[in-house]
C-alpha cells in the first residue's frame, strides 16, 4: 500500500506540473462553462436590448386607404416614417436594410372597417434573424388601436362589463393543469445537459494524464527503469490508474460546480416568471442529489482511467496515445447524446447500457424522480465494469509485447 | 557474482515483420511467427570484475541485459546471483542490480533530488538512510548545485550524473550498463568510464555492453562475444585475442563473428 501511495504521489506531482494536463484537468472545466453561460447570456442581453431600443424605419404603403394609420405611428418615438416609398421597391428596400418594415394597407380597408368587418394590414419584414423583434414592435401600436376599436364596438352592442365581454369572446376556456412539478418539467429539458457536460469533462480530465503516464513513460525512455524496480507491475498500474481516475474526478467535480454556479448566476439575472421558475428549479436540487451524481462519477472515472491507460501503454508515443483518444471520445459522446433524445428513458434495458445509464440516471436525479433500485443497479454495473477495467489494465501492463512494442 | 545459464528468449513476430520472404539475408533466429532472439546465452561475472559484452547490432546484447535486469522474462535458462537461483524471484534480482542504458531518460518534471528519492523509496530504502545516501552521492558527484533543478533544465552531463546516482541509490552489488556511452559527449563519457572503474574498485560486479572495443580493452577483465543470439566466446581479453590469432581486438572480433575485415570487404567489393 505504501508503495502504491509513493507511486501515486510521484505521478500526481508530475501530472500537476504539466501545463497541458493542468489546463484540461483544472482550467477547462472551471472556466469553460462560466464562459459559455456568461458569454451567451451577455451576448443575448446585448442583442435583445439593442433590438428593443433601436428606432425602426417603416413605410406606410396604401396610406390613403386608411389615413388614420399615420396618426397611430407619427408621434411614436420608436419609429421613423419613411415617406413616398414606391410599393414595388418595398421588398428590395427591406432586404437592403433601408427599411425595417412596411405596412401595406389594402384598398378596401376603410370600407371593411366601416361595415364592421375585420380588416388586415400586411406587415412585411425580413424575419430572417432568430432574434427578430421587428414584427412584434411594429404590430404592437396597431394591435392596441384594434383593442380600442373592439371595446368600442362591444360597447355599441351593449357589452360593457369585462366579465360579460370575456364570456362573449371566449365562451369555453381550455385550462392546462400539469401534474409534473416545475422541477420535473425543467429537469426533463435541462437535466440531460448536466451529464453531457460532466461525462465529457470526466473523459477529458483522464485523457491527458493517461497519455502521459503510459505512452509518455515510453517516449521519455523511463519505463524500463521503472519496470526493473522491485515493485509488482500491478502496484505500478494501480498507482498510475489512481492518478488518472483522480484527474477525471477533479475535472468532473469542477465542471459540475462551475456549471451549477454559472446557471445560478444566469438565472438570478433573468426576469419574469421564467427566471423565477428556473431559480426554483435550481434551488430544489439538493446537495444530496449532487452527491448521488458524484457517486456515479467515481466508477465512471475508473472505467475511463482503465480504458485510456490501457490504450496509452499500448501506444508507442504520446502522440499515438492522443490519436487513439479521439475515436474513443466518439464512443463516449454517442451514448450520452442518445440520452438527450426525446423518448429515451431509464428502463431495465437502458440501465444496463454503460454511459447511457449514468447519463439517464443523472437526468432522473435532477428531475427528482430516480428509482433507488435503478440507481443501485447502475452503480453496481458501472462499478463491475470498472473492476474488470483495472484487472484488464493490470494484465495488459504485464505483457512484454505491449510494453516493448516497437 | 552474477551468472547467466542457457538464457533463451523467443518473441512472437508481429504480422508483416518477419525477414523471411522479403529477400533479406536469412537470420537463423527467424522462424516465421517466432523469433529466437537468444538461443542459449551463458556467462559469469565475479564480484569486483568488469565484463564487457560485444557483438554486432541486433546480436542480442540488449535483450540479454533486459533479461538479466528482469525487464524481460527468459523463455528458458537461469539467472544465478551469488550461487543462488533467482530466476523465479525477479524482485530479489531487482534489489541487487542497478541498470543504466545510454538511452535511459529522466522524469522531466521532477527535480534531480525528487527523482533519486523516488527510486530510493521504490527500493524501500528507509527514509533517514535515503536522505543520507542522497546527500553523500550528490557530494561525490558534485551535484548539490542543481539538486533542486527540474531534470528538463539540466545539461546532458548533469542528466547522466542524475542517472548514475539513481542507479546507485539502493547500493546494488551488480551494475548492468547497456551501451552507456552512446550519444554522450567526451566529458560525460569520461565521467561514466571513471564511474565504472570506481565501481570495480568498490568490489561491485559490472556488466556492460558497448560498441567501443577501446572501452573493452581499457576497462574489462572479461569479454563475452554475442552473435545471432548465442555467446560465441567468454573469457579474458588476452585469451580472446589468442584464440582468434590476432593481437588487434577489432580483427579478433571480426574473426569471431565470421565477418571479413573491413579492408578485405572493400577489396572484395572492388573486384
Image (tube, grey):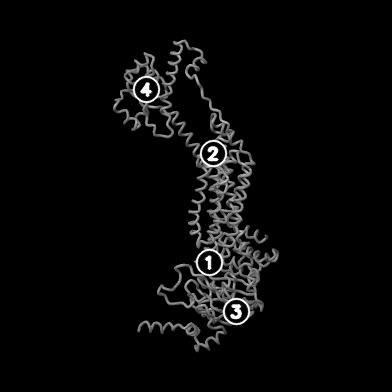
Q: Nearer the viewer, residue A320 or B137?
A: A320
Q: Do pointers 4 and 1 mark residues of a single chain? A: yes
Q: Nearer the viewer, residue B44 or B152?
A: B44
Label 1 sits on a secondary structure element that is: helix
Vertical comparison of B207 with A225: above or below: below
Q: Residues within 10 Å of mark 4 (few under 14, many from 20)?
A: some
**Counting residues from the N terminus, which is met first, the one under dot 4 or under dot 1?**
4
Q: Distance of mark 3 from mark 2, alpha carbons?
A: 69 Å
Disc 1 marks which residue? A401
Disc 2 marks which residue? A190
**In which image quadrant can residue B115 be found?**
bottom right
Q: Distance of mark 3 from mark 1, alpha carbons?
A: 24 Å
Q: Residues within 10 Å of mark 1 (few under 14, many from 20)?
A: some
**Residue at 61% from the left image edge and 78% from the top image edge:** B3
Disc 4 marks which residue? A121
Chain containing mark 2: A
Disc 3 marks which residue? B5
Is A214 on the left-hand or right-hand side of A97?
A: right
Q: Do pointers 3 and 1 mark residues of a single chain? A: no
**Counting residues from the N terminus, which is met first, the one under dot 4 or under dot 2?**
4
Label 4 sits on a secondary structure element that is: loop
Residue A158 appears at what percent x and percent y? 47, 10
Cβ atoms under marks 4 and 3 closer than 8 Å: no
Chain containing mark 3: B
Q: Do pointers 4 and 2 mark residues of a single chain? A: yes
Amino acid at each position: 500500500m505504501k508503495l502504491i501511495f509513493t507511486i501515486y504521489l510521484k505521478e500526481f506531482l508530475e501530472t500537476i506540473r504539466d501545463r497541458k494536463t493542468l489546463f484540461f484537468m483544472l482550467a477547462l472545466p472551471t472556466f469553460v462553462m462560466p464562459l459559455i453561460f456568461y458569454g451567451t447570456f451577455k451576448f443575448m442581453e446585448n442583442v435583445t436590448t439593442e433590438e428593443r431600443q433601436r428606432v425602426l424605419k417603416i413605410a406606410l404603403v396604401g396610406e390613403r386607404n386608411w389615413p388614420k394609420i399615420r396618426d397611430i405611428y407619427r408621434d411614436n418615438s420608436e419609429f421613423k416614417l419613411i415617406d413616398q416609398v414606391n410599393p414595388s421597391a418595398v421588398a428590395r428596400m427591406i432586404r437592403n436594410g433601408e427599411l425595417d418594415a412596411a405596412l401595406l394597407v389594402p384598398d378596401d380597408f376603410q370600407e371593411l372597417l366601416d361595415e364592421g368587418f375585420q380588416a388586415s394590414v400586411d406587415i412585411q419584414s425580413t424575419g430572417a434573424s432568430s432574434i427578430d423583434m421587428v414584427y412584434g414592435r411594429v404590430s404592437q401600436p396597431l394591435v392596441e388601436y384594434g383593442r380600442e376599436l373592439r371595446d368600442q364596438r362591444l360597447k355599441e352592442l351593449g357589452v360593457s362589463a369585462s366579465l360579460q365581454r370575456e364570456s362573449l369572446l371566449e365562451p369555453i376556456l381550455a385550462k392546462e393543469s400539469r401534474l409534473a412539478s416545475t422541477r420535473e418539467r425543467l429537469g426533463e429539458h435541462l437535466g440531460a445537459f448536466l451529464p453531457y457536460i460532466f461525462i465529457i469533462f470526466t473523459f477529458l480530465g483522464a485523457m491527458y494524464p493517461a497519455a502521459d503516464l503510459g505512452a509518455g513513460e515510453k517516449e521519455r525512455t523511463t519505463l524500463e527503469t521503472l519496470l526493473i524496480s522491485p515493485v509488482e507491475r500491478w502496484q505500478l498500474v494501480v498507482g498510475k490508474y489512481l492518478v488518472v481516475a483522480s484527474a477525471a474526478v477533479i475535472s468532473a467535480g469542477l465542471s459540475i460546480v462551475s456549471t451549477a454556479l454559472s446557471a445560478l448566476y444566469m438565472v438570478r439575472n433573468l426576469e419574469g416568471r421564467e427566471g423565477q421558475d428556473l431559480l426554483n428549479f435550481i434551488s430544489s436540487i439538493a446537495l444530496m442529489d449532487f452527491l448521488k451524481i458524484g457517486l456515479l462519477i467515481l466508477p465512471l472515472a475508473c472505467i475511463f482511467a482503465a480504458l485510456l491507460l490501457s490504450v496509452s501503454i499500448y501506444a508507442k508515443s504520446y502522440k499515438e496515445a492522443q490519436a487513439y483518444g479521439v475515436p474513443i471520445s466518439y464512443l463516449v459522446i454517442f451514448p450520452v447524446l442518445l440520452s438527450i433524445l426525446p423518448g429515451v428513458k431509464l428502463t431495465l434495458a437502458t440501465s444496463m447500457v454503460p454511459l447511457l445509464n449514468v447519463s439517464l440516471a443523472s437526468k432522473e436525479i435532477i428531475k427528482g424522480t430516480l428509482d433507488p433500485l435503478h440507481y443501485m443497479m447502475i452503480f453496481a454495473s458501472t462499478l463491475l465494469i470498472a473492476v474488470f477495467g483495472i484487472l484488464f489494465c493490470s494484465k495488459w501492463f504485464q505483457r512484454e509485447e505491449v510494453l516493448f512494442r516497437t | 557474482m552474477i551468472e547467466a545459464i542457457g538464457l533463451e528468449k523467443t518473441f512472437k513476430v508481429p504480422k508483416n515483420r518477419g525477414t523471411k520472404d522479403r529477400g533479406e539475408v536469412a537470420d537463423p533466429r527467424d522462424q516465421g511467427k517466432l523469433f529466437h532472439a537468444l538461443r542459449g546465452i551463458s556467462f559469469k561475472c565475479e564480484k569486483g570484475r568488469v565484463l564487457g559484452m560485444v557483438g554486432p547490432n541486433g546480436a542480442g546484447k540488449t535483450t540479454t541485459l533486459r533479461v538479466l535486469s528482469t525487464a524481460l522474462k527468459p523463455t528458458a535458462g537461469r539467472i544465478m546471483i551469488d550461487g543462488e537461483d533467482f530466476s523465479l524471484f525477479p524482485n530479489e534480482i531487482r534489489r541487487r542490480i542497478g541498470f543504466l542504458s545510454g538511452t535511459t531518460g529522466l522524469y522531466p518534471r521532477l527535480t534531480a533530488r525528487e527523482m533519486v528519492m523516488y527510486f530510493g523509496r521504490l527500493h524501500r530504502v528507509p527514509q533517514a538512510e535515503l536522505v543520507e545516501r542522497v546527500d553523500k552521492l550528490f557530494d561525490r558527484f558534485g551535484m548539490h548545485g542543481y539538486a533542486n533543478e527540474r531534470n528538463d533544465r539540466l545539461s546532458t552531463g548533469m542528466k547522466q550524473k542524475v542517472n548514475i546516482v539513481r542507479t546507485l541509490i539502493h547500493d546494488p552489488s551488480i551494475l548492468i550498463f547497456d551501451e552507456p556511452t552512446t550519444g554522450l559527449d567526451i566529458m560525460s563519457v569520461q565521467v561514466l568510464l571513471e564511474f565504472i572503474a570506481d565501481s570495480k574498485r568498490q568490489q561491485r560486479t559490472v556488466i556492460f555492453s558497448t560498441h567501443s572495443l577501446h572501452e573493452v580493452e581499457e576497462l574489462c577483465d572479461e569479454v563475452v562475444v554475442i552473435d545471432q543470439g548465442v555467446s560465441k566466446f567468454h573469457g579474458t581479453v588476452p585469451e580472446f585475442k589468442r584464440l582468434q590469432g590476432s593481437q588487434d581486438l577489432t580483427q579478433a572480433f571480426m574473426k569471431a563473428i565470421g565477418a571479413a575485415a573491413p579492408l578485405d570487404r572493400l577489396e572484395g567489393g572492388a573486384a
